[in-house]
Image: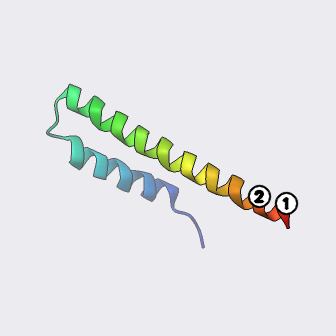
Amino acid sequence: MAVKAVEMIRKIRDQHYTETKELSVQEQFKFVRKKSWELQKKLKRSKRSTADNIAQTVKT
């Protein structure tokens, strides 16, 4: 199965455009900051989960 990276990126860009096309510049900054914060939170959770799994594997 091939990954269609260009299509994926285009879809994401189109979605972001639709969400932000009527926003002011200030509101666009807030949008980007919010998305960034959500991603960082998700990655931290994922990192903790991976660390917990490794710790449990080492204990056994």
Q: Position of residue 28 (x, y in %)?
A: 25, 33
Q: Position of residue 50 (x, y in %)?
A: 68, 56
Quarter of the image where the N terminus is located: bottom right
**Mark on residue 48?**
none
The residue lying at 16 percent from left, 30 percent from top is 24
Q: Are marks 2 and 1 in contact (CB under 8 Å)?
A: yes
The residue depicted at 55 percent of the width and 47 percent of the height is 43
Q: Determine which residue is flagged by label 2.
A: 54
Q: Depth check: 53 or 11 in front?
A: 53
Q: Is residue 17 above or below residue 5?
A: above
Q: Residue drawn 29% across and 37% down?
A: 31
Residue that numbered label 1 is attached to: 58
* Left-right relation of 59 to 23: right
Q: Is 52 displayed left or right of 43 in the figure?
A: right
Residue closer to the observer: 15 or 27: 27
The residues bearing labels 2 and 1 have C-alpha atoms spaced at a distance of: 6 Å
